[in-house]
């Protein structure tokens, strides 16, 4: 498999994209999880589906748009969806969670309309829904790397503000932090990560890559910085392992990446359950 | 540097048609320790929000360090511990040291890294509240009283001249509450930090603070603690609008 990565450019694209996504998705995912916004990634991925389906429909209907890369319209619709979520959360302050089903169902509805109009998209759409090892092109890789740089720069620069807002929003307001501005950029960056990750992990499973490695990291980390590091480690393990297995089994990588993430989480949870027992047995043995 | 840290001048605030506070005037000076006391729904938390600039008064004006609160930018000069501080998610993956360090966020400036001596400052702030040995612990695993000390350390780390505490002892048992108040007294005396403490616990704090303000939609009394103690019964009756019997805590001097 490693030799195949060097041999085929499509595998290089998939692995390079996977490595970037394995870092940025869980890194941003940590802030999403601790702010209890996990479902936002799901809502945005469904809005991305609308953009992808729209782009595929346009490519099918107009010859001049045949070469249009669906990732661009996917990113555009995801960013628009994130702004709409922000606006809805402001409008329904006491029922902020309402924004999620509104945007999610809206995204699925628009996607379904485009898919029906085009009378199906064959295997193209399956690649976007569950990810693909072979379909990641050079253009996708460049977009994903750019999104990776923007995301890493945003988290690097706004780390202390993001931490403070996540931990104690009221204190952040009292300190005069510009929460509106930070939240605005946070939503934009989330939309970019969701839309760009779908090429590798798939629209339907992208939110898992933002939450499962974080869930595992929170079991082992003692602090926030440690949780961030472990999230990235588990994210990378899942993506690399998932891409290798998908290539060998000739299946969609979205499923294998998420199954490996779940396995990592289960192993850590099992280990945490067993450790106190092992310690108790050891202590009992020692005292005897 | 102005001597007056907080100044409210004829401030009124309404939530819709309901008046929360009216015609409130108050001055807090350097080194003073104020207790703001009042029954539930009396407007104490609204008063704090007005002082912090989280809401704007419909009439009157609020000044911090001699500047209108809306234009006051040096929020690091004020340490704040909210009523809800210890209502955070206890599974939040953060160490005590990370939480305290976040108190430097405003002083450091947007999109800048924490200063190099940030860890030293964290330890000094934790030391001031007797929590230095807990620096590496997870914040969610501490008791309510310990968590409140950590939040005081977070408020202290930026070297504030004024500490605002909104009912910080909610959910803390009596024994820890007393040592918590002792710590506040020390901070006020030894570090000359002015303190504005919103509390229900009139009994304990009236002997600790230098000034008292009694709030119930307006300020019914504000002045030195000695005067409050001298006129306590009359102030209470006027404040609540009917005679009030004071019940002391079991560890106090008995019932009046």
Image: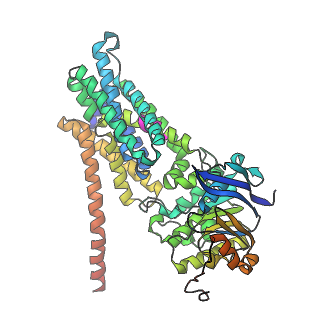
Whether the magenta-drawn stretch holds residue B131 is answered as no
Residue A15 visible in rendering: no
Q: Is residue B188 left or right of residue A285?
A: right
Above or below residue A260? Residue B231 is below
In the depicted view, which residue is nearer to us: A284 or A197? A197
Above or below, B32 relative to A71: below
Pick whichever, B225 or B92, lies toward us: B225
Looking at the figure, which quarter contains the C terminus of chain A? bottom left
**Does residue B96 appear left or right of residue B164 in this picture?**
left
Q: Dividing the picture into quarters, in which one does residue B242 lie?
A: bottom right
Which region of the structure is painted magenta?
A: A186-191
The spot of residue B202 in percent (x, y) is 62, 75
What residue sits 52% from the left and 61% below the top?
Answer: B84
Magenta stretch, overall SS: helix
Residue A190 forms part of the magenta stretch: yes
Q: Nearer the viewer, residue B17 or A211?
A: B17
């Amino acid at each position: 498999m490693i030799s195949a990565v060097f041999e085929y450019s499509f595998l290089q694209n998939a692995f390079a994209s996977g490595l970037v996504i394995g870092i940025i998705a869980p890194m941003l995912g940590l802030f999403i999880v601790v702010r209890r916004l996990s479902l936002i990634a799901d809502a945005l991925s469904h809005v991305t589906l609308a953009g992808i389906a729209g782009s595929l429909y346009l490519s099918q209907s107009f010859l001049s748009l045949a070469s249009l890369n669906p990732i661009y319209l996917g990113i555009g619709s995801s960013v628009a969806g994130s702004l709409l979520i922000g606006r809805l959360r402001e409008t329904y302050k006491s029922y902020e969670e309402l924004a999620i089903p509104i945007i999610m169902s809206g995204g699925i509805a628009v996607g379904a309309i485009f898919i029906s109009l085009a009378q199906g998209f064959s295997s193209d759409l399956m690649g976007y829904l569950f990810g693909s090892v072979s379909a990641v092109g050079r253009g996708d890789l460049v977009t994903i790397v750019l999104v990776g740089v923007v995301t890493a720069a945003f988290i690097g620069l706004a780390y202390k503000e993001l931490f403070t807002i996540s931990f104690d929003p009221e204190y952040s307001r009292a300190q005069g932090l510009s929460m509106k501005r930070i939240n605005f950029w946070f939503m934009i960056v989330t939309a970019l990560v969701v839309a760009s990750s779908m090429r590798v992990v798939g629209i339907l499973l992208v939110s898992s890559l933002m939450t499962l490695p974080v869930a595992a990291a929170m079991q082992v980390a003692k602090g926030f910085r440690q949780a961030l590091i472990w999230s990235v480690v588990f994210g990378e393990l899942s993506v690399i392992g998932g891409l290798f297995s998908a290539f060998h089994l000739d299946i969609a990588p979205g499923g294998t990446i998420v199954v490996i993430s779940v396995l990592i989480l289960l192993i850590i949870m099992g280990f945490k359950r067993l450790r106190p027992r092992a310690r108790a047995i050891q202590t009992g043995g020692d005292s005897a | 540097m102005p001597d007056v840290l907080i100044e409210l001048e004829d401030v009124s605030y309404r939530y819709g048609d309901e008046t929360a506070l009216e015609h409130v005037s108050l001055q807090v000076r350097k080194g003073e320790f104020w207790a703001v006391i009042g029954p539930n729904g009396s407007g104490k938390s609204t008063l704090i929000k007005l002082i912090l600039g989280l809401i704007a008064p419909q009439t009157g004006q609020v000044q911090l360090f001699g500047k209108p609160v809306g234009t006051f930018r040096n929020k690091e000069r004020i340490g704040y511990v909210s009523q809800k501080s210890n209502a955070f998610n206890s599974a939040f993956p953060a160490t005590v040291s990370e939480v305290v360090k976040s108190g430097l966020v405003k002083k450091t400036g947007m999109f800048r890294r924490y200063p190099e001596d940030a860890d030293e400052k964290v330890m000094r702030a934790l030391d001031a509240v007797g929590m230095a040995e807990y620096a590496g612990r997870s914040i969610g695993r501490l008791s309510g009283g310990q968590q409140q000390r950590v939040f005081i350390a977070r408020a202290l780390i930026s070297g504030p001249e004024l500490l605002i505490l909104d009912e910080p002892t909610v959910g803390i048992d009596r024994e820890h509450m007393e040592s918590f108040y002792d710590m506040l007294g020390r901070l006020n005396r030894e570090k000359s930090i002015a303190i504005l403490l919103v509390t229900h616990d009139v009994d304990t704090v009236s002997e600790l603070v230098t000034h008292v303000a009694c709030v119930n939609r307006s300020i019914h009394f504000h002045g030195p603690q000695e005067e409050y103690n001298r006129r306590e019964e009359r102030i209470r009756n006027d404040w609540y609008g009917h005679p009030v019997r004071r019940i002391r805590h079991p560890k106090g001097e008995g019932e009046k």
